[in-house]
Structure formats: C-alpha cells, structure tokens
Amino acid sequence: MAKLKGIKPLVQNRRARHDYFVEETYECGMELKGTEVKSIRQGRANLKESYARVRGGEVFVDGMHISPYEQGSIFNTDPLRPKRLLLHKSEIRKLQGQVSRQGYTLVPLQLYLKDGRVKLELGVCRGKQLHDKRDAIAEQDAMRDIERAMRQGLKSRDFDRD
C-alpha cells in the first residue's frame, strides 16, 4: 500500500479556542489500539471534555472519547481510557514547567492524519474570562461586518461598469 501524503483533519475541539487563549501548540503521536485507529479514521472521536496532564514523566490525555469500532469484537477497548502521548523527554519537561504556572492547562485542539498516522495537536492554554470572550465575539462580528461591506462595495462597483 502506498504511503499517504499530507494532512487530513479528522476531529477538532472548537470549544477550546472559545474558552482558552492558546499560547503554544505541540504535535504529538498517540499510543492507540488498532480498533481505535479505525474508529478515529471514521471520525468517531470527541475532544469536547478532554484534557491532558503530565504524570510520572509521561503525558496522558484524559476524557477523549473514541467510539468502539463497529466491526471490532473483543479487541474494542474502553472509549474513555487514558491515552499516552508520544513526545520527546525535553518537550515533556518543558510542558511540565509551563503547566505548573498558575492558570495554564494542556488542551487537545485537534486530531488529524499526517502521512497516514494519527497525530494530536496539543495546546498550552490559559483560560479566558467572560469579558475576554465578549471581546473576542465583538471582534469577530466587526470583522464579519467589514468583510460584508467590502463584498457589497465590490458588487455595486461591478454593476456600475455595465
């Protein structure tokens, strides 16, 4: 079988960017079982309530739900089991230092396929306050209005030429 090239996004945690400021991101491999990989390839994973933590010099992601593979049998695993992330030791030490600061946490942002392998984008995040969320929403609305006005301006100019 030919090796697949490129990146194919599978599952995203959209809520994470709404609730947190993403300071830094890391690409991690994951220790998965075969039926979990097949289920993830079908897009049957959920990152909404998931988080990561450093335990014993290793990073684990907890709360990530991977639905059992439908054609699987006794090899299906617990959907909520903690999954170990594959990172270099220096990266783990750096993450541990960043998370030890008050207000920072590790949040899975997305799952994707890179050259046929499942990867997880892990973010070092700081929580947003309510007023920060309101500011972000107001900024998005303003940008949307500006883009809409620019499109309307281009459309009206096109009709003037005819």
Image: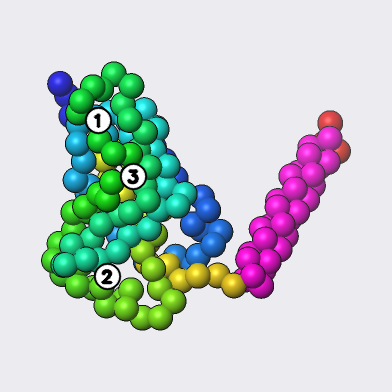
Q: Residue furthest bottom?
A: 101
Instruction: Using the rendered view, name the quadrant where residue 154 is placed.
Output: top right
Amino acid type for the residue under numbered disc 1: Asn
Disc 2 versus disc 3: nearer the observer: 3
**Which residue range is magenta in the image?**
130-159
Q: Secondary structure at mark 2?
A: helix
What amino acid is found at the position of numbered circle 2 in the picture? Leu
Secondary structure under tag 1 reads: loop
SS majority, magenta:
helix
Judge by depth and name the residue closer to the eye, 117 or 47: 47
Q: Is residue 3 above or below residue 11?
A: above
Question: Local crowd at mark 3 within 10 Å, few (<14), some, or many (≥20)?
Answer: some
Q: Residue at x 79, y 47 (%)?
A: 153
Residue on which the image places disc 3 = 80
Residue that numbered label 2 is attached to: 95
Q: Is residue 15 highlighted in magenta?
A: no
Tell me, for residue 36, which label it has, or none: none
Task: Point out the residue furthest to the top here.
Answer: 71
